[in-house]
Image (cartoon, helix red, strand yellow):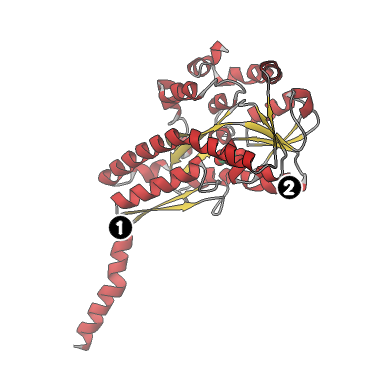
Amino acid sequence: MRNAILTVFWLVFAVMPAITLAQSIVIKFPHDLAPTTPKGQGADYFKRIVEERLPDRVSVEIYPSGSLINDQASLEALAFGEIQMIAISLSKLDRLTKRFQVFDLPFLFADMAQVEAFQGGSVGQELLSELEGRGLLGLAYWHNGTKQLTAGTPLRVPEDAEGLEFRIMDSDVLLEQILAIGGNPQKMPFTEVYQALQMGAVDAQENTWSNIEASKFYEVQEFITLTDHGYIGYFVAVNPDFWRGLPADVRSVLDEALAETTEFVNSTAREINAEARATVLASGRNTLIELSTEEREQWRGAMRPVWDKFSGDIGPELLEAAGGSVH
Ligand code: LMR
């Protein structure tokens, strides 16, 4: 009798949880932003619908705000299978391939329709598998929005940027872009930016309204110049071995959930950025600098030489597909 009780005890407490654990697939999905941003909301949305549709089979662990790992380190962690999913700024793929540099060319995209035509077209879709051999299989593009310049001093014309320290993402195109306007670029992980701005280690930076608001950059940067000079979007990627090793039925539910999430993110990002802009302006802390057509042309002209430096590496096919040849 005692043995029978022990056997039942052993089955219930030792073997059953192991079986459940064996069936449960964990997707670790760290990112660098607050949950309120387009990426943060997308990650949470994906988790919710996946766990609803695959209860006890898949759990999605979201680590926002760089709480597990920063963006730079996440590229390697994904390739080594330490995490399973990322949504990283396209700019930060620069050190792995030159081809993604197209996304950083200043003033390339006139609007989101142009971005979407490129990403959804055959060349943009082929780019998703460009890094598969490096352990990063792209599955989707998510939008954030267009970049504005922020600084502690007013930036109305490119000469105003002369000598200022600018934080930039890990991208050589962005580095040249800041040099072209006379600034000193500093590559820095997103998670360090607020403090660098607050301490005065850097004077200025470029980002979307949702990032400026969610990470409180507006509290430490008085001036915001509406330039819309570049795009921030994300490469949503998985570890290829992990993904291909999933049971087919699980993977098809995940594919569907990701497609729905992409639709959700890309249809709400504009509104999230508009709300963030309203929140920032309502704080009364900032001076918004709206450019005249002539002033905007000055920024475009000053940054234009960057194209000549990178268009050779990017290649005419990509530039053409992104609409680069029309500018
Ligand atoms: C940045 O580092 O400024 C942005 O890429 C952060 C993000 O993920 O949007």
The answer to whether any part of residue 220 appears in the image is yes
Measured Cα–Cα span from mark 2 to mark 1: 44 Å
Q: In this rendering, is residue 8 above or below 55?
A: below
Is the residue marked by circle 2 packed among few (<14), some (14-19), or many (20+) residues within 10 Å? some
Image region (quadrant) for ligand 1: top right
Towards the viewer: 10 or 121: 121
User: Which amino acid type is shown beneath numbered disc 2?
Assistant: Gln
Position of the C terminus by quadrant: top right
Is 118 on the left or on the right of 32, as rendered?
A: left
Look at mark 2 in the image and give the residue it sits on.
198
Give the SS element for disc 1.
Answer: loop
User: Which amino acid type is shown beneath numbered disc 1?
Assistant: Asp
Is the residue marked by circle 1 packed among few (<14), some (14-19), or many (20+) residues within 10 Å? few
Towards the viewer: 51 or 98: 51
Numbered tag placed on residue 250 in the rendering: none
Is 255 on the left or on the right of 215, as rendered?
A: left
At x 68% / y 23%, what residue is drawn? Answer: 291
At x 66% / y 17%, what residue is drawn? Answer: 293
Look at mark 1 in the image and give the residue it sits on.
56
**Outermost bottom residue:** 2
Position of the N terminus by quadrant: bottom left
Towards the viewer: 35 or 282: 282
**In the rendering, at what x and y percent does residue 41 appear?**
46, 45
Give the SS element for disc 2.
Answer: helix
Which quarter of the figure has residue 300?
top right
**In the rendering, at what x and y percent does residue 282 appear?**
62, 41
Q: In this rendering, is residue 277 above or below 9?
A: above
